[in-house]
Image (spheres, rainbow, N blue to C red):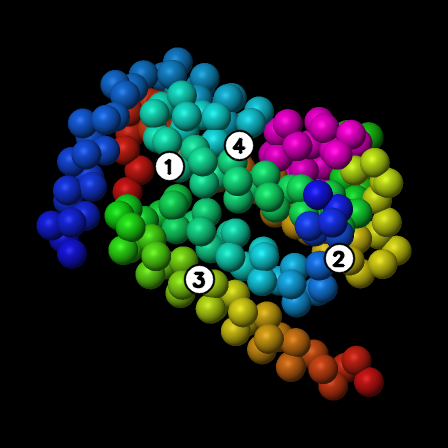
């Protein structure tokens, strides 16, 4: 377990979190393979875009 | 598309277990103890597998990243909320000390991320518990 997750980069952790939560939300809220796949892709991209957007917005404050 | 989804709905209705209040409570408790077990009892095979691997994976990742796990004796409000969130992970919460042999290390960002991943696993499991309760009662979620 440590070898699998222990060396995750922060971006890797973000990707893992986004895909796992997107799949779970899709199974909670949608029915059918096509609907779930679409929702998973949409939620995954939304997680990534929001995280990267917030990263850019906060970048000036890190200097 | 609608035809395909309605086919899935019909298959789920045929497969559905006739619900009652007791079955809902049993499914909810089982789902809390082991993520996905409530759905397994209700014969929702794919949901049970997905919930177990997604929530279990998230919890194990949080522990492997040396995230902190909140105990019941917290005095701070945020720690209490953290305990409530962590408790949702069920068996992963109770086995956290065995699974995380090196202990938490929240002095580094990775450990802090691990704390959030574990709490997220607990909160996600609470959502699946509510769904298992509804299915068990015979109320079909949308």
Which callout, 1 or 3, points to the residue nearer the camera? 1
Check residue A43 in the rendering and tell me which mark sits there, or answer none.
3
The image shows residue A32, relative to residue B89, as above or below, that is below
Marks 4 and 2: which is nearer the front?
Answer: 2
Q: Which mark is residue B64?
A: none
Residues at marks 2 and 3, CA–CA distance in whole angstroms? 25 Å
Dot 2: few (<14), some (14–19), or many (≥20) neighbours within 10 Å?
Answer: few
Mark number for residue B35? 4
Residue at position x 39%, y 37% in the image: B47
Disc 2, disc 3: CB below 8 Å?
A: no
x and y percentages locating residue A37 in the rendered image: 34, 57
Which residue bears the numbered disc 2?
A: A7
Q: Quadrant of the C terminus of chain A?
A: bottom right
Separation of marks 1 and 3 at Cα, in angstroms: 20 Å
Mark 2: secondary structure: loop
Q: Quadrant of residue B77?
A: top right
Kindly identify which chain the residue marked by label 2 belongs to: A
Q: Quadrant of the N terminus of chain A?
A: top right
User: Disc 4, disc 2: CB below 8 Å?
Assistant: no
Label 1 marks a residue whose chain is B
**Residue A9 in view (yes/no):** yes
Judged from this view, the residue extending furthest toward the front is: A3
**Is B59 placed left or right of B108 in the picture?**
left
Residue B39: name its quadrant: top left
Residue B40 lies, in percent from the top left, at 41, 25
Relative horizontal placement of residue A6, taking residue B12 as reference (left or right):
right
How busy is the neighbourhood of tag 4: few (under 14 within 10 Å), some, or many (20 plus)?
A: many
Tell me where the magenta segment starts and ends, as one range: B78-99
- The answer to whether the residue labelled 1 contacts the one labelled 4, judged by CB atoms less than 8 Å apart, is no
């Amino acid at each position: 377990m440590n070898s699998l997750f222990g060396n995750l980069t922060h971006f890797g952790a973000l990707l893992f979190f986004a895909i796992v939560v997107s799949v779970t939300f899709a199974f909670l809220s949608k029915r059918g393979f096509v609907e779930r796949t679409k929702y998973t892709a949409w939620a995954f991209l939304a997680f990534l875009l929001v995280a990267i957007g917030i990263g850019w917005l906060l970048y000036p404050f890190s200097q | 598309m609608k035809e395909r989804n309605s086919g899935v709905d019909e298959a789920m209705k045929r497969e559905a277990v006739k619900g009652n209040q007791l079955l809902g409570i049993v499914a909810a408790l089982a789902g809390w103890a082991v993520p996905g077990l409530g759905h397994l009892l209700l014969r929702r095979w794919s949901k049970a597998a997905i919930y177990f691997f997604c929530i279990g994976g998230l919890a194990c990742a949080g522990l492997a990243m040396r995230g902190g796990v909140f105990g019941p004796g917290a005095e701070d409000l945020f720690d209490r909320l953290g305990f409530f969130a962590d408790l949702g992970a069920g068996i992963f919460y109770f086995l956290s000390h065995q699974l995380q042999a090196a202990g938490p290390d929240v002095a580094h960002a990775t450990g802090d991320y691990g704390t959030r991943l574990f709490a997220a696993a607990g909160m996600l499991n609470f959502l699946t518990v509510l769904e298992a309760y509804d299915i068990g009662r015979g109320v079909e979620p949308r």
